[in-house]
Image (tube, grey):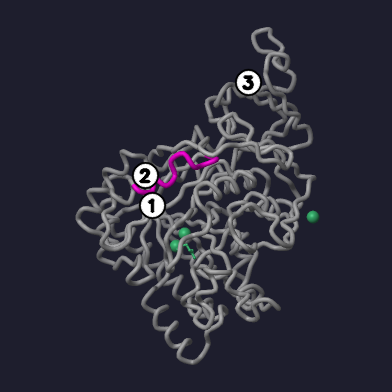
Amino acid sequence: MKTLIKNGTVVNATGTATADVLIDGETIAAVLAPGSTLLGFDIESNVDTVIDAAGKYVIPGGIDAHTHMQMPFGGTEASDTFETGTRAAAWGGTTSIVDFVVQYAGENVLDQYALWQEKALGNCAIDYGFHQILSDVQDSSLVAMDELIKEGVTSFKLFMAYKGVFLSDDGQIVRAMQKAASNGSMIMMHAENGSVIDVLVQQYLAEGKTDPFWHGVSRPWQAEEEATHRAIMLANLTGAPLYVVHVSAKQAVEQIAAARDNGQNVFGETCPQYLYLSLEDQLGASSEEWGSFEGAKWVCSTPLRSKHEGHQHHMWQALRTNDIQMVSTDHCPFCMKGQKDMGIGDFSKIPNGIGSVEHRMDLLFQGVADGHLTPERWVEVTSTTPARMFGMYGKKGVIQPGADGDIVVYDPNGHTSIGVGKTHHMNMDYSAWEGYEIDGHVDTVLSRGRVIVDDNQYVGAKGHGNYIKRGLSQYLI
Ligand code: URP
Ligand code: ZN
Ligand code: ZN
Ligand code: ZN
């Protein structure tokens, strides 16, 4: 099966050119000047499929390096399965995800890894890899880190919050970091001071402040800045590379920027919710249906920040200046009915998470339309850097010969209404992005050479997605 994507504007992180892209089987065979011949053969009449991309961007498929499909969490389970979540991702121009294997305290890491492989196998619409969450860091967990690298799991997430669920204490963090420093893997950190947050949560609840708004207030930026700083210091002590997940506070960004100026291998990820949404407008929202519980739709951690403190503006700027390197979704969807509503009367019982896997490419393209990012930087933060950061670059994250045929034809003159009601494809009974209008449109999506979304139709297949055996990070200084 040969496909030619002709006359498009090919956008890589490194630059833009009008070019034809020839895909042979699952792989990009050539990137050519429009209308080129190959060894005397006219290409167009020798391929099975021609896609005319005149006036459109041709970009490497999106890579969402932070998702939680069907994750058991907060007394329930994230509502997207590997099947529904990867299909929704495909709709939005994302052709790879990196999800998280969960090891809760007391569980065996390698057993959990086997379990997650089983959950995903045969179910995914797009390619998928795994990071490993480590909770209590046992002796066997350190041995498992070496074993998992051989399996293509080269990054390990630790938590400084959620005591009794995920939290690792500083000693456990140091032990995992020492191992990462010695085997070349990446430590990912949920950087919030959990002890401080737990006290504030109890105090607000005791005062009768039980609405979702108080979820945000009880997780202040100081708790994020402090934990980010502590993680950076522990990484400095041990020599481990550190990737701070879901950064929302501008003060945490500044800690990351300072560490990078200091020459440390420290990186930051943000998410669309921290670029657009706020404590006041979303967590503080009310509706006819839910009253002041409406804000539960946006309960996630780190929380949405105040719109009066400049976090969102600073985050766009940090993306532009590379103080923050990439954007993932932290896709962790829960329905309002039967899941989020467990927290009516007690915000601490609302399962934490927002679903955005379908909208990340569009929401970040809006940053191009609004003048925050160049098209090249859009590709870089949504695809190229995720590939390099997590050891997939070359096959993923770039349009070049030898890369996987993971390609999105994106129309910068199109329009996408995220819409009112259920117009999305995620398994959620609401949208965190209801009413958002995007000045662009995902036209065609190819995964390893196969068209999986075409002209507002899903034409992919469950099980098409392969496991990505990742290498070590290609982003380290
Ligand atoms: O609220 C969030 N972020 N839920 C997912 C788990 C995590 O901490 O990433
Ligand atoms: Zn987290
Ligand atoms: Zn997460
Ligand atoms: Zn518009």
Q: Position of residue 17 (x, y in %)?
A: 69, 32
At numbered mark 3, what does the secondary structure look like: helix, strand or loop?
Answer: strand
The residue sitting at the left extreme is 139
Q: Which residue is mark 3?
A: 2
Secondary structure beneath disc 2? loop
Q: Observer-nearest residue: 377 or 212? A: 212
- Amino acid at dot 1: Val
Q: Which residue is mark 2?
A: 153
Q: Quadrant of the C terminus?
A: top left
Q: What is the crowding at mark 2: few (fewer than 14 residues within 10 Å), some, or many (at least 20)? A: many
Specify whether 50 is left or right of 283: right
Q: Residue furthest bottom?
A: 207
Q: Are marks 1 and 2 in contact (CB under 8 Å)?
A: yes
**Residue in view at x 54 percent, y 63 percent:** 334
Q: Which residue is mark 1?
A: 101
457 above or below 190?
above
- Vertical order, 249 against 151 (above or below): below
